[in-house]
Image (cartoon, rainbow, N blue to C red):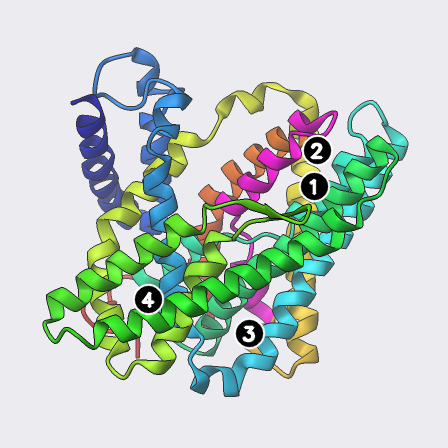
Amino acid sequence: MEILVSLSAALIGGLLLSRAAKRLKLPAVTAYLITGLLLGPFCLGALQISGLGFSSMEAVERLNILSQVALGFIAFTIGNEFRVSQLKTMGRQAIVVGIFQAVIATVLVDLVLILLHLVRPEIISISSAITLGSIAAATAPAATLMVVRQYKADGPLTRLLLMVVAIDDAVGLVLFSASFGVAVALESGAVSVMTVLVEPVVEIILSLGLGAAAGVALYWVEQFFHSRSKRLSISIGFVLLTAGLSMKEFEVGGVHCGFSLLLVCMMTGTLFCNICDFSEELMARVDGWTAPLFVLFFVLSGAELDLSVLRNPSVLLIGVIYIVVRSLGKYAGAYGSCALSGCGEKIQKYLGVTLLPQAGVALGMAITAQALADGAVVRNVVLFSVLVYELVGPTLTKRALLAAGEIQPEGRTSARKKNG
């Protein structure tokens, strides 16, 4: 009963608060995150009233399966952007920008935090500095997709943005695995080529392979059904299947093998959309079905934000430096790579702003980083940055897309029609 009442409070509360956010011209995703904060263990949840919010972090974590499923559908939807027609026009630009902006953000954060270590070694170790630099590469696709959906954004900037945030996951995975391997080596004194180079590449290959197989299988199964509702049900079943399979981990010949949930589901969507002639209609129906799931995802994400990190002055100092330098790296990297790859002036100017949000992927990396001697510092800094980025990022994304002319001014956007 408590779980169901808490979920209903999350869903209804998030939707009601989104009406207030609309009056303030804020994206709905910001309202959902604030709802989560209010219902979380640091606000209403602290009252310990059954069904009124989430009384502890454990209560939120018990619902983590919903967040994983939501991320699976988000990635599946983003896969729709990788159609062959899109890749022919923007594929090279997306790859260049996706790699360049992530690397620049990582290098800048590495340099500044290593300098901080040299000046104040008691605040942060060099292994944690290197690890935080790699986490800076990660961009959250969920908040970006929600803003694009809410305002029916469309245009070259929006299309490139959705492709870049998808590519960013693969790049971030490689950078983090390599950097974390180096960090562990610095603490243990032994470099593992397997951890630094082999395992991240294996994870990407396995993820893309599983996703491709699932995409082909989905198309094959869909052909046995002609009812829209049954085709929708099959699609939902396959996303649940791929999300579940992506959690599998195993070892082969001493190599730890795993999958990236985002990459697997993204590849499933990409293959399916490129070989299925009725995919666009089906994807539109999937979008409608997942709307309440995404609301719950962001409310739960807000409830997971740990406000206790605000009590630690050193975490706040490192966090502010991390946020400022990462933001600068993302913007400069996007601007430079867009100019290098021949993107339009508006894309050069505004893309970097839309790449700031950070959430689930970065938190997952931070949990892994807790294995370091001062891994708690990494986790708390990432928690602080996620708190800031998730609350501010969606609004910045909206403003950038509005300034680029890819969403209509407030009050003129139809819920049934794309911007155009």
Label number found at residue 143: none
Q: Label 2 crowding class (10 Å Cα cut-off): few <14, some 14-19, many 20+?
A: many
Q: Are marks 3 and 4 in contact (CB under 8 Å)?
A: no
Marks 2 and 1 sit apart, C-alpha to C-alpha, by 10 Å
Q: Nearer the viewer, mark 4 or mark 1?
A: 1
Of label 4 and label 1, which has the lower sequence position?
A: 1
Q: Residue at x 49, y 26 (%)?
A: 306
Give the percent coordinates (x, y) of residue 221. Answer: 24, 71
Q: Give the labeled residue for mark 4.
A: 409
Q: Amino acid at mark 4?
A: Pro
Residue beneath the point at 38% across and 48% down: 244
Instruction: Tell me whether the residue at label 2 lies in contact with that at label 1, contact meaning CB atoms closer than 8 angstroms.
Output: yes
Q: Which residues are magenta?
A: 349-377
Residue in the foreground of this view, choosing between 376 and 262: 262
* Residue 415 seen in render: no
- Give above or below for 135 relative to 170: above
Q: Which of the marked residues, 2 or 3, is nearer the chain's N terminus? A: 2
Which badge, 3 or 1, is on the more N-terminal residue? 1
The verdict on residue 356 being magenta is yes
Q: Which residue is mark 1?
A: 132
Q: Which residue is mark 2?
A: 318
Within the magenta stretch, is there residue 113? no
Q: Quadrant of residue 164?
A: bottom right
